[in-house]
Every structure is written in C-alpha cells, then in structure tokens.
Image (tube, rainbow, N blue to C red):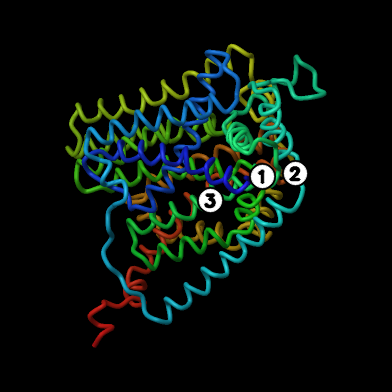
Amino acid sequence: MTIIAFLVGILFPSLNGVLLVRLLEGRTMVLAKVERLALGCVTGLTLMMFLVFVIHVSTGLALALPLFLSVHILCSIILSFFCWKNGFLPSLNTGISFPHETLKDLVTGCFIVLGMWIAAKVLLTSTVFLLLAPTYLDDSLDAWNMRGKLFYTDRALTLVLPGENPETSPLGVSSYPPTVPLVKTWVATLNGEWNNGLINSIQIVWYIAALILVFYGIRRHAGLFWALTGTYLLGSIPLYLMHGTNAYADTFLSVHVFAAVSMLFHALKAVSMDTRQSFLRLGAVLTALLPFTKNEGMLVYLPPLLLLLAGTLFLLEKKKIFSRRDTVQTLLWYGIALLCIAGPWLLFKWSNGLTFGNGKPFTSLGIGWQENVLLSISINTFFEGNWIFLFPLLLGLLIWQWKKAFGPLALLSSYFLIIYIGQGLLYLFTSLSTEALRQTGYARGLIHLTPVVILLTILLLQQAFPRLSNALAEKREMATD
C-alpha cells in the first residue's frame, strides 16, 4: 500500500501538471517529452496543493481524501477538456527534438560510468536518510514533517504546533507556505496512515526533477556534451545531494527558482515569436508559484525575477522584437498569474497575522556591522567541501568571460549577483548574521541558486571552450567510415 500511495500521490498531480504545461505551450511545443514530465511534476504538485489550500480555507472542508481527490479529478477533467478542444492530447507523448549528436566512444563510456556513480550515490543516500534513518533535522521535523502530520491528524490547516503558545506559534514555522506539508498530508491520506519513510521519500522527486530540468536547460543552448557535464556537476555537489536526499524543502524551492528563471532565459534567447511567447506563458505560471513555495520565494527570489522580466521586455521592445501590445500581453500573463496564486496566500497571511520572514518578522532585525561574517562566508564558499570547486570556477569565469557573462548571459549573471550580493549585505549588516556564522541560512541560500549557477557556469564554459564539445563529438556518418 505504501508504494501504491507514493506512485498515485506523485502521478495524479503530475498528470495535471503535464496537462497544464502542454496548454501553456500552446500551438508551439517548446519542451522535450521528458522535460515536460519533470516540469509537469514540479508544477502539478505545487499547484494542486495550492488549490486544496484555497478550497479548504474558503469552505472549511476537511483535509481528507474526498477533498484531495475532488481537486485532482476535477482539474484532470477541466484540463483534459481544454487539451482535447485544442487538439493537444495526442501531443502529450511528444516533444521537441534536439540536433542529433554522437559522442566519441571514450567520452560516452566516461559519462556512463559517471552516471552510474551518481545514481549509486543518490540511491544509497536517499535510502539511508529518507527511508531508514529517523527524521532528526530541526527544519525537517518542525517546518515540514510535524506540520504535515498535524494537518493529517487534525484534517485542517492548523497554525498552532503542539506544546506552543497559541499567540506566538503562528509567527514561527506556521508562517511558511504549506505546500510541502500538504504534499505529505496528501500522500499519507492515500496511504491511510502516517509513514515517515513514505512522506520523506517525496523529497527525492524534486531532486530528480532538478537534474532533468538542468540537463534540458543546458541542452537547449550548448549541446549534449555540456548538458551531460552540467547534470553530472549538479549531481556531484555534496550539499545539494544532502539536501535532495533529506527531508528539507530547499531542493524543492531550488527547482522552482530554476524553472521560473530558465523559462525567462529561454524566452529571451528564442528565435521565433511563437516560441518566445510559449516560454513566457510557462514562466508566468512558474513565477507565480514562487510565493507558495517558501517565504524566500516571495521575498528573495520573486522581486529580482520581476525586475529582470521588466528589463527583458524593455530590451525586446527596444530591439523591435516585441511590440507594445506584446509587452502588455506578457505583463498581463505574469500579473494575472501572480494575482491568482500569490493573492490568496498573501490574504491568508495578513488575515492570520503571519510573518513574512524566516520564522521572524524582518522589522525585528537590528542594523550594524556583524563581526566574522566575511570569514565564515569565505570558509563556507571556498574552503569546505560543500560545493567542491563550483563557486571558485564561477567567479573565475565571470571575470574571464565578462563580456559573455554580462552580454548574452546577462540575465543569469544578474539574477545570481543581485540575490547573492543582496543576501550578503543582510548577513553583513543585520542580525541575520547568525545564519552565516552558523553556516545555515547562507548555505541554504546557495542551495536555492545551485541549478541556476550550474546553468550559468556551464554556458560560460561552453563560451570559453567553443570547440571542446565538437572535438569530443563525432557525426554518425564519421563513426561509420
């Protein structure tokens, strides 16, 4: 029953996500088949939990199987109808194809070995930390698992955790968006009982989705060799692997950030107008989901993305690629999507007096220089094994390939630097310095950006060594000579 609950719990919302993603693509498909499945899984899980949240809060219906199934089935019917009406149903099992590339036998063999090594690490760590070991990490217990179990037991979106003060408890982890706890509640409800191994195993889904989306994000712009290299690099980052195979929510947020940013980047690089608009429609919904992931999604990652959206539209209009009507239409997509998703969640937070910070209101942060923060950040970023050589490599490439970094890749570079510098200033000049000194919040912030960093780093490497992938690949005709 546990395996069935896991499969149904993932597949049902994923189906709705795939249907929605296909509708957003429209007449012009822009995603590969597997890429659509991964994006549909990420989108469907979050969006279905949002709809459950809205209906539960507005009607008082219990968080029980009838409500969950009603939302999933009704959405399936509605989305299937619109896909059928537009003739998209037959194309659910198809996607775009990339130019055929054949790597040399030695290179292929190396990637096979490296892929098997990554798969073995993921299997071992996820089995140990998600299925066998008890959940013991503070955030995993309080913010995600305990809240999910409380929702499951009370069959309601309870804001007061057991043993806590009813006046202060909602100001802590209960102020976080309930998406991850609701996913755990949904799967436990299907199972008929709370099972820690079952509800923890969901975490690996977001990690695998991140690997898939990064692969296709790079493949779209740099070819097969660099896509495989980037995917291996992401799978090799120790701290990202640890978060992806533990009951944290940071990998969950990271894949949402990457999806929203990469869709805007793909739109900017697109050649045809239809392709660009398809990516922008996808980006609008994925951006609107950010406030319902974690508090950082709305406070940290949404504002710079909207700023870069405005810059992108300005650039497209200045180059006569977009008309004023196209700009207004895109702003409406993003605005309506944000209003429909972020609006109800913000209204709920305001009406219940929930905070918007990391378990504490930002107004409580003191201002002043914080000692030893720079040292702690330097050690975490460059001298520990959390990231291997990822950030020294990125820093070197930003300096070496600065024309490319702030030219064709300016959107990715700007997004990373705005957030990284902005967070750094908070750690340096506010009492949030404890998040850097204890190497907690600072490291988690880098986790959120890791897929975007991988995409930027690999594309900069490809720009630095444009002939490398060609040297390691060969045409099929050449292989048969």
The answer to whether one can see residue 366 in this image is no
Instruction: Point out residue 47 in the picture as x, y percentages from the top left corner.
Output: 47, 32
- Going by the numbered disc 1, the residue's amino acid type is Ala
- Going by the numbered disc 3, the residue's amino acid type is Thr
The residue carrying mark 3 is 450
Q: Is mark 1 on a helix, strand or loop?
A: loop
Q: Who's the residue at 60% across and 60% down the image?
A: 122
Rendered image quadrant of residue 281 = top left
The vertical placement of 451 against 283, above or below, is below
The vertical placement of 382 against 247, above or below, is below
Task: Tell which circle, 1 or 2, labels the residue nearer the N-terminal end.
Answer: 2
Q: Who's the residue at 30% across and 70% down the image?
A: 101
- Label 2 to label 3, Cα distance in Å? 21 Å
Instruction: Point out residue 427 in the picture as x, y percentages from the top left corner.
Output: 66, 38
Task: Tell which circle, 3 or 1, labels the residue nearer the N-terminal end.
Answer: 1
The residue carrying mark 2 is 137
Would you say the residues marked 1 and 2 are in contact, meaning their CB atoms lie under 8 Å apart? yes
Judge from the rendering whether residue 458 lies leftward or rightward of residue 383; answer left or right.
left
The residue carrying mark 1 is 247
Q: Residue furthest front?
A: 1
The answer to whether one can see residue 396 in this image is yes
Instruction: Point out residue 275 in the picture as x, y percentages from the top left corner.
Output: 24, 44
For the N terminus, which image quadrant? top right
Closer to the camera, 103 or 266? 103
Q: Who's the residue at 66% across and 62% down the image?
A: 124
Label 2: few (<14), some (14–19) or many (≥20) C-alpha neighbours in 10 Å: few
- Going by the numbered disc 2, the residue's amino acid type is Leu
Which of the two marks, 2 or 3, is nearer to us in this view? 2
Rendered image quadrant of residue 157 = top right
